[in-house]
Image (cartoon, rainbow, N blue to C red):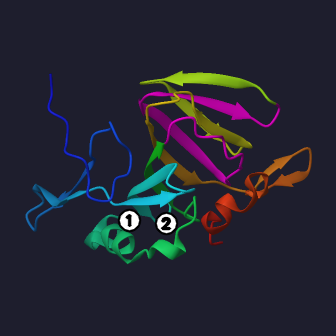
């Protein structure tokens, strides 16, 4: 059995392991190196019922790794400039959901890959259809109005997401852009900065 990483200093989720970020690169001869290794930095949301750890961001597609341009852009990305999605780029984020967290219905202008790392979560779509995702399950979220609910009343749950900016979505000629209005003021500060 493997040993879990210790809880991160800014982590609020009890019972979940800490997270370590390991970012690779190249030395001057082209050999692989670790550019950095650091603990997760958690941002607490919604009265400490949810927390985000932004692992990495990119600000262009396709991303340029030359001259560590992507590393510099990631380090220079201020927290207040990053919404749920990074326009023209990607966001790699871990999200911890508190016990019995109610879903915050929203749509991002993005193609998202979500993997359940710990616990069990319910994915709810705006038509009311629900699916239970268990540890290891994957959701491909294609700019739909959706929400996530932790099914446990006592344990935290964790997901790993990669959000990729996408072109404006048109359905029968109607543009369906980012929509955070279904969550009231809860998500106000998380709008993408387009």
The 10 Å Cα crowd at callout 1, few under 14, some 14 to 19, many 20 or more, is: few
Q: Is residue 54 left or right of residue 129?
A: left
Q: Quadrant of the N terminus?
A: top left
Res 149 quadrant in image: top right
Q: Which residues are magenta?
A: 98-127
Q: Position of residue 187 (x, y in %)?
A: 65, 60
Question: What residue is shown at x 26% (from left), y 46% (from top)?
Answer: 18
Q: Position of residue 24 (x, y in %)?
A: 21, 55
Q: Is residue 117 left or right of residue 140?
A: left
Which residue is label 2 attached to?
60
Q: Is 5 one of the magenta-colored residues?
A: no
The 10 Å Cα crowd at callout 2, few under 14, some 14 to 19, many 20 or more, is: some
| Up-down relation of residue 194 to residue 101 (above or below) | below
Q: Position of residue 168 (x, y in %)?
A: 74, 56
Q: Residue furthest front?
A: 154
Report if residue 62 is visible in the image.
no
Question: What residue is shown at x 44% (from left), y 51% (from top)?
Answer: 93
Q: Residue furthest right?
A: 173
Dot label at residue 131: none
Question: What residue is shown at x 46% (from left), y 72% (from top)?
Answer: 79
């Amino acid at each position: 059995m493997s040993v879990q990483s210790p809880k991160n200093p800014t982590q609020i989720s009890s019972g979940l392991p800490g997270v370590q970020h390991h970012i690779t690169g190249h030395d001057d001869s082209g050999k692989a190196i670790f550019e950095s290794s650091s603990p997760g930095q958690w941002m607490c949301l919604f009265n400490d019922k949810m927390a985000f750890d932004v692992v990495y961001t990119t600000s262009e597609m396709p991303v340029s790794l030359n001259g560590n341009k992507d590393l510099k852009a990631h380090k220079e990305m201020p927290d207040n400039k990053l919404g749920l999605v990074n326009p023209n780029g990607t966001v790699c984020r871990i999200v911890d959901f508190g016990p019995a967290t109610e879903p915050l219905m929203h749509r991002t202008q993005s193609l998202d890959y979500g993997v359940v790392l710990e616990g069990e979560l319910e994915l709810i779509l705006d038509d009311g259809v629900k699916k239970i995702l268990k540890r290891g399950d994957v959701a491909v979220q294609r700019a739909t109005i959706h929400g996530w609910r932790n099914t446990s009343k006592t344990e935290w749950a964790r997901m790993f997401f990669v959000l990729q900016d996408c072109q404006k979505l048109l359905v029968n000629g109607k543009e369906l852009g980012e929509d955070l209005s279904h969550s009231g003021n809860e998500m106000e500060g998380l709008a993408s900065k387009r």
